[in-house]
Image: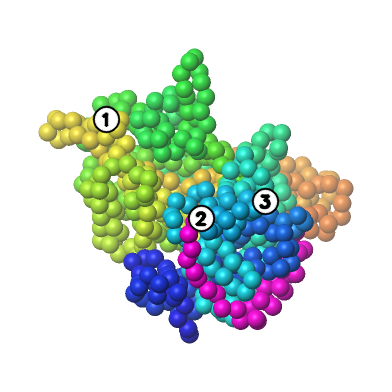
Amino acid sequence: MEPIGVLSEGKIYDLQTAEALNITGEEIRNDNSIESLEILRHSCAHLMAQAIKELYPEAKFFVGPVVKEGFYYDFKVDSKITDEDLPKIEKKMKELANAKLPIQRYETTKDEILKKFANDELKQAVLKNITDDTLTVYKQGDFEDLCRGPHVPNTRMIRSFKLTRVAGAYLGGDEENEMITRIYGIAFFDKKELNDHVRMLEEAKKRDHRKLGTELELFTFNDEVGAGLPMWLPNGARLRSKLEKILYKAHRVRGYEPVRGPEILKAQQWVTSGHYENYKENMYLTQIDGQEYGIKPMNCVGHIQIFKNDLVSYKDLPKKLFEYGVVHRHEMSGAMHGLFRVREFTQDDAHIFCTQAQVKDVIIEVLEFVDKLLTLFDFKYEMEVSTKPKKAIGDDEFWEKTTKGIMDALDENKLPYGIDEGGGAFYGPKIDIKILDAIGRKWQCGTVQVDMNLPSRFNVEYINDKGEKEQPVMIHRAILGSFERFIGILTEHCAGEFPFVIAPTEVIFVPIADTHVEYAKSLQKELIYNDIDSKIFDMNESLNKRIRMAEKQRVPMIVVIGDEEVANNSIALRDRRKREQSNMSKEEFISMLEKIKKGCEV
């Protein structure tokens, strides 16, 4: 394996930059490590841009960064590029890789770059945001672009890659700017890794929650209603309601109290909280009676005011408040993606007010809750402690103290975790819960955040054991993150085969003849009283076709009813998940379903 870079103080440098700046550190080799893939994918983005330039000489380029899913480049051409053009671009990339072009770094002045790209409005837009006088350029063959790097030394190292899709993107992410073209891609040093990843992408397409959401009639979007505002259809609303019920009971048995805060608050509340200064661009603001109000992007301020409504004793702590809180955040049009990124969503939100001595126990109890719920849905997960971001409130002492408290709680309970440097909320450090789905993708969902800033800003107090007023610690906590995002992830995780306990329809009854429909209706009514949803397929089709139709609905259980079942008060069950058929009495059937539901409590 060849050396391609250096890791020094958490930063990645390619060999040319390390030599130019006299930087030493841990050697990075072409071994598919996270650091090596960042170098490779950055280089592959440039290789793609070079191929595009050769195929479309008029092309102008904006930026081409490495991202979580691989890399992309934003650019502009006269032609319309679609997914059908990607094989042609890949072919040209392979030719350039086979040419074994050295990738060379050189430094120049900003003035020289401005002159060089004087007729390139995209490059001028990039340069507007750069204040350095000395800039770096990377060159390979006839192609060069302004870039900090890092890059591999030669195009011969870029072998295993795949362009995945074409998208539109607003220049600089600003909706006021023109829409330009973006191509995404992925690259590995190892061909097997690439092939495995491509298979995963193909499987992901089959599991796409937007596709399944339409097929299963779970939710819809409507441009007349507005972008990023999902509408839940009956099937989806039933699924969501069942998830809410599971969570409601799980919260109550753990001592949480339900509350409900307003969806719009005076802007001064958001000024006090710090959201106005740090989060205003993501908020919707309006004027009412000459005063500014803000639609809530988070639930914490409402919960603080609810806590302050009573004089709370230390004996009442920890005090746990939870809400299915509807929030609104302004997302860019280009950033929205099905249920994953929307402008209105509902958090399974809770805020726990406790003493400093209780913080560790509260965190561990929350993580036990997380484990129970994610295990129910067959998710594996990882945890990361996110530290102070660049944009933050509170002094260093607060951040060091609370971050150490989180890590101590995890260490003492032998819970493994990673570190996300600079990934904390602006008001405090946090634990992020990242779940792994059935095809190996990682998703950010739940979070546990320790906060002493907001209690201070809002003068939140309780009466301690000495009869004095004292400030509590506030812990922000969401397990699913949001119902919308979690349902989207769960849909893809189980490919629409939802667990029985939350399936929109758990049972489909298929009466063989019209004379059996009345018995099916009586069973359906009994199941409703047991919070189990069912449908009756009595349409004018053959029995086999109706059974096939039921199976396409991905319901867990299909029940066939004929003369024998009506006469004996029994049912003929087809369990789709277990691929088993059995006969049982009505009482046995209902008892079995109740037992399944009971086993899914968290």
Residue type (three-letter) at the residue carrying disc 3: Ile
> Residue beneath label 3, please?
180
> Residue beneath label 2, please?
111
Q: Residue at x 60, y 39 (%)?
A: 529
- Tell me if I can see residue 242 in this picture: no
Image: magenta residue range: 82-110
In the rendered view, tell whether residue 500 sits above or below residue 301: below
In the rendered view, does 463 fall on the left or right side of 570? left
Rounded to the nearest whole Å, what is the CA distance between mark 3 and mark 2? 26 Å
Which mark, residue 459? 1
How was this image coloured? rainbow
Q: Label 3's element?
A: strand
The answer to which quarter of the image holds residue 71 is bottom right
Q: Is residue 49 magenta?
A: no
Q: Residue at x 84, y 46 (%)?
A: 539
Q: Residue at x 61, y 81 (%)?
A: 100
In the rendered view, does 581 fall on the left or right side of 450? right
In the rendered view, tell whether residue 160 sits above or below residue 446: below
Q: Label 1's element?
A: loop
Mark 3 or mark 2: which is in front?
2
Residue 47: image location, x then y, percent:
62, 70
Question: Which of the two discs, 3 and 2, labels the residue nearer the N terminus?
Answer: 2
